[in-house]
Amino acid sequence: MRSAILGVAVLAVCVGPAGARSLGSLQFEPCTLTAGHAAVAVEAQCARLAVPEDHDRPDARRIELAIAWVPAANEAEPDPVFMLAGGPGQSARDAYPLVSAAFGEVLRKRHVILVDQRGTGGSNPLACRDEQGQSALLEDPAGDSPEAARAFARRCRAQLDADLARYTTTDAVADLEAVRVAIGAPALNLVGISYGTRVAQQYAGRHGAHVRAMVLAGVVPNTLVLGSEHAINLEAALERYFEQCRQDPGCGDRFGDPRAALDALSRELRQAPRQVRFRDPVTGVSRAGFMSYGHLAAVVRLYAYAPQTAAMLPLSLHEAAQGRPEPLMAQAQMIVEEVGDQIMLGVQLSVMCAEDVPLLQSRPEDAGTVLGTAIIDISRWQCEDWPVRPAPGDFHQPLRSDVPTLLLSGELDPVTPPRYAEQVLEHLTRGRHLVLNGQGHGVLRVGCTPRLLARFIDTADAAELDAACLDDLPDTPPFAGFYGWEP
């Protein structure tokens, strides 16, 4: 059993038969964490913790939280790292393998704990399927109607066994506190990613005495209404990416203006879907389908998340505009099958209907953008009959805190641009914001960021970080052909 050594407190860890281990009051068993089709796996310990579905009624129905523990390589410090996944609706255990490289140095001294937010992963998942049994990721801005959106919400509700009003950020924060108590940790280091930064800020606002340090990567301010600025943020990122193509002879000379290709393709697909025969990107089997404007919007939006995938957009848009849509359709299908299954739409609705949709306002100026007004319109329609419990009155107030905080942003992030982190930083007395040149929405693994992450969690001092190693991050050039970049 591990306990205090030389006066330094550590988390109590017990090793039982056949590899079973305990952390605090939780009993863990060996498990393997995987991430969809990605060829990456992480060995861990897994456990479950029963919590009230309604924390205001502790004697009523209980649900189980799925928890994974990635043990430290050496004697662990008493304050573990909790990684909080994005979405809303993403499983922390499923997301971790894809970013695990960012935590390599952190694991020298601290355990990493992954709690599937209620309604995701193994924590009573709230998966909503459309009439074809697929995740309803493709919300077609050209074709969705109030009737279709409401019908989907009704079908989703009928599929789910849950008190849907109790699957919000506030409920997730109460769950995290229950896990902290169960494992016997006096304090936590929170690493929030995207929507997970909202969870981190809400936890710090309610349990700040138990937060030693925070890392917020892809920052969502408490003051932000989710969905309100997705359209304009995407447009700003696309303009930056497309300008890179215009200025690059290997791209601009071959493909022309990507914006012109996107606009031409948008006009065509808004009028009618195009029948396409393409090769399935996972199985390799030839298949037929209809490419709608929803497919186009999904590819453009999600490929803009990372510069490596955004680099493919000029080529893919040019090919589709020239009558060769097969690569674009294959990319859209990959997004539907891989990304769609990662997000539990029931959780997304429970979070947004309670916390954001009451504040969402129509934005006529979004009508000419790739996303248009679809996210706002569809969210409002779907939430009309979704069970909600109003968010706490102070939910959208800025977090005012002296918790040491490192904020990380990608310069070209199409979802959480750097200005969001600057807004949060204004109210943090011990915060520091680093912007990664040429990067998009996921920055934890980029360049020397894993080393900076480990150093910050070790010292809880953002001001002393030497971040000069980020200055030389290069831009990612656009693809000049199907074999990638120019030599």
Image (spheres, helix red, strand yellow):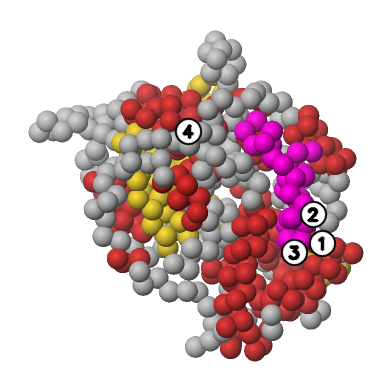
Instruction: Report the magenta residues as a range.
Output: 354-381
C-alpha separation, residue under disc 3 versus residue under disc 4: 35 Å
> Contact (CB < 8 A) between labels 1 and 3?
yes
The residue that label 2 is drawn on is: 140
Which mark sits nearer the N-terminus, 4 or 1? 4
Q: Which residue is mark 4?
A: 202
Q: Distance between the Cα atoms at labels 2 and 1? A: 7 Å
Are the residues at dot 3 and dot 4 in contact (C-beta closer than 8 Å)? no
Amino acid tagged 3: Leu
Q: Nearer the viewer, mark 4 or mark 2?
A: 4
Task: Name the side, left or right, on which 401 lies relative to 268.
Answer: left
| Proximity of marks 2 and 1: CB atoms separated by less than 8 Å | yes
Mark 1 residue type: Ser
Q: What SS does tag 4 mark?
A: helix
Q: Is residue 372 magenta?
A: yes
Label 3 SS: helix
Residue 168 relative to residue 142: left or right:
left
Residue 387: where, in percent of width, then height? 71, 26
Is residue 15 in view?
Answer: no
Badge 1 is on which residue? 292
Does residue 346 appear left or right of residue 208 in this picture?
A: right
Between disc 4 and disc 1, the foreground one is: 4
- Earlier in the chain: of badge 2 and badge 1, it is 2
Q: Amino acid at mark 4?
A: Gln
Task: Tell me the tag on residue 296.
Answer: 3
In three-dimensional space, the C-alpha distance between marks 4 and 2, rounded to whole angstroms, equals 32 Å
Query: Going from the N terminus, do you reach mark 3 or mark 2 first?
Result: 2
Q: CA distance from mark 4 to mark 1?
A: 38 Å
Q: Earlier in the sequence, mark 4 or mark 2?
A: 2
Q: Looking at the picture, how far across and down is residue 163, in whole percent?
A: 66, 23
